[in-house]
Amino acid sequence: MISIRKIGVLGRTYRHVRRYKEIVSILVKYGFGDVVDALNIKEHIEFGWQKISGKQPEQIEKLSRPERIRMALEELGPTFVKLGQILSTRPDLIPLEYVQELSKLQDKVPAFSYEDAKAIIKSETGSFPEEIFSSFDKTPIAAASLGQVHKALRDTEEAVAIKVQRPGIQEIIEVDLEIMLDLASLVERNVKELEVLHPTKIVREYARSMDDETDYTVEAAHIEHFARQFLEDQTIYVPKVFRQWTTKRILTMEYVEGIKGSDLDRLKQEGYDLKEIANRGASLIMKQIFVYGFYHADPHPGNIFILPNAVICFLDFGMMGRISNQEREDFTELVKVILCKDEKKTVDALLKVSNFTADPDRSELERDVAGFFDQFLYLTLKEVDIGNLLQRVLEILAKQGISLKPDLFLMLKALVTVEGLGRSLDPDFQIVEYAEPFIRDIQASRYTPKRIARDLIDSGTEFSQLLREIPGELREVIKKAKEGKLGIEIEHRGLDRTIFELGKISDRIVSAIVLASLIIGSSIVTLSNIPPKWRGIPLIGVVGFLVAAVMGFWLLASILRREKRDEDD
């Protein structure tokens, strides 16, 4: 498991300073020097720090802020690229324009040496590649930020693909995550405008997701789960996983040769029916989402191979999406009320599939939804672009500080990607046509006798459970009341000013009592003629009267200031 902690003094001295300075240099290069200054990093990293300054190239100054962030993340390396890719699926965490730009992030990393790959395979399996396989290609067939893929042959001459994790990547990610957490803490303390994004929470959630990304047994489980869904479907092929050669740092699976979904010229040359491929691909993604609720969340053309007989093979199962039955039903209800052009019900349905902290302005939301209807609902299916439609919905929600639930957004993003691939294969492709029967089935399933009976049984079970728990809970309350341990917590709001004023009043009352005591005490001392004396008057009495006079003037001035302030207000 990846360890993430706040950076301590030793960490700043030996593990992080060099990388910290590299990160800050890149931020300054891409025009974020103002943020660096606001974070007071120079004071934070005391040891070995030198002032980093510099002017970014002129062409960078012309780019938008989201573009500069994307380019900075690409230069910062694997940990930051992965962070950007994950944030590109979270419109609930970052503004929409950043979501769009970060979705363009690419891994730009060279392959690592065969010697490193061999050493990792040896440490994970106990054997060198040549001892396991009859042949092993030393040159990788693909390389990414976290690992690279080599082709090999088993003794049976069956080809396999072995994904090998980059050497030292765990340590790199760990250091970067610790620096991210440190920077996030500084952001929350020093940049009030970004505090609402809860950067430390984002980093901690990202650290948990990186645990899965760097554990190839998780991806192996995804592949096997995905394969079980389509055991009887002859239109899809899922590569087989070889568990005996799969660990946290290596993944061995069947090597599949096919034509990339984006290679249209080759598909045409070999006589494939592009329209049939588009139809099959759309049907498969609909089944994944609306039937199984477990789907490939990154179905871009590079992750899809076309095999003989137009069989579709998905690759790279690192990013998978899940959507619950309830979320599917909420989404289909949204589609239904949109098609009925009902603004009020559409707003209700939108809020059901969204996250928000403050209640939105419903009247404004309904006006925006009506404008959305005018923009899209009078177009033909061929004219509707799902990507533009989704973009408009997100803009409407963003105006009110609302965001789609992450699982639903990831699902819609996958559908947009599939629509783009489908239209490249078939200009008349309409993903809405493929979604319609699945949506209709989900809506109909809510009213089947079996579903109604199941809901009634679930509700009855929950109610029965509640009735069983009430006596015990009530008994516990009575027991605590008898023992004097029952307490009621009351949280007051808006009373701070009142409490402050009452405090001031009590201070004045105490001051007045002390003042009166001084005057009475000083008078008694004076009348008692107690030495020492000054000009025949007891000195202690004189001092008492002077202190009382000062306190009296202070108390009077305080009252007059208060009255003047009240008049001004």
Image: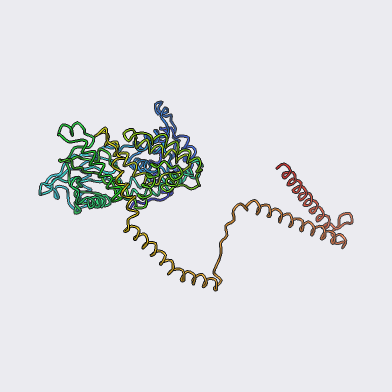
Looking at the picture, tell me which residue is in the foreground, 430 or 397: 430
Display colour scheme: rainbow
Query: Residue 515 at what x, y percent from top left?
Result: 78, 56
Is residue 248 visible to us here?
no
In the rendered view, would you say 54 is above or below 322?
A: above
Residue 225 or 158: which is nearer the viewer? 225
**Number of numbered discs present?**
0
Position of residue 344 measured from the top left corner of the image (x, y, whole percent): 46, 44
Q: Position of residue 483 (x, y in %)?
A: 54, 73
The relative height of residue 198 versus residue 511 in the rendered view (above or below) is: above
Quadrant (top left, top right, bottom left, bottom right) of the C terminus:
top right
Nearest the viewer among 180 and 465 is 465
Q: Is residue 545 shown to the viewer in this render? A: yes
Q: Residue at x 42, y 35 (%)?
A: 374
Determine which quarter of the picture holds residue 33.
Answer: top left
Q: Residue furthest left?
A: 156
152 vs 188, left or right, is left
Among all residues in the image, which is located at the extreme right?
536
| Image location of residue 226, percent across then percent down | 25, 50
